Image (tube, helix red, strand yellow):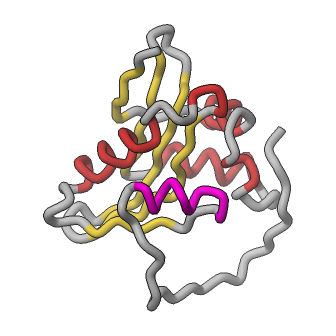
Amino acid sequence: MGYTIRQERLTAEEYIGFLKETDLGSQYPQERFEERVGRLVERAPISLAARDSAGSLVGVCFGITDFAYWLFVTDLGVIRACTGRGIGKALMQKALEAAGGEKDIILYTCPNEKAVPFYEKLGMRKADGIMVYNHIEWTSFTVT
């Protein structure tokens, strides 16, 4: 199965449907979920969609960047039926290119522990020195 990747704004409904077919559906807090996902898909500076030949959404990558020094990938997912086909790697490469390229951009992400081996295969490593300010309500749930 082939796929294409392009910069694209998804609707909140389409992204929520996508989350149900991936392991990303457990990374968000339940509080105001639909409202916040709406803002995410509307405003993420990097918004990439991978679609199969039928036009179905098979992968997504969202990131925030200054287009000069850094890119923080907030969401990277591939539907369970398509994992292991290089889609996630291709999305990461495309996001890095869109932000300015690997010669200028440092790439960051906060992966789910199950995804750490994937990121390590891409050459990423765990880093020290990151500060966090987190005072939000966070009720875990899985998008179903």
Q: Please, what is the dominant secondary structure of the magenta stretch?
A: helix
In the image, is residue 12 above or below residue 52? below
Residue positioned 33% across, 62% down in the render: 65
Q: Quadrant of residue 30?
A: bottom right
Residue positioned 66% across, 33% down in the render: 80
Q: Quadrant of residue 53?
A: top left
Residue positioned 20% across, 59% down in the render: 102
Residue positioned 40% across, 44% down in the render: 89
Image position, residue 13 (x, y; %): 67, 31
Image position, residue 50 (x, y; %): 44, 29
- In this rendering, position of residue 12 left or right of residue 63: right
In the image, is residue 70 above or below residue 135? above
Determine if the magenta segment contains residue 118: yes
- In this rendering, position of residue 95 left or right of residue 34: left
Determine if the magenta segment contains residue 18: no
Q: Which residues are magenta?
A: 113-121
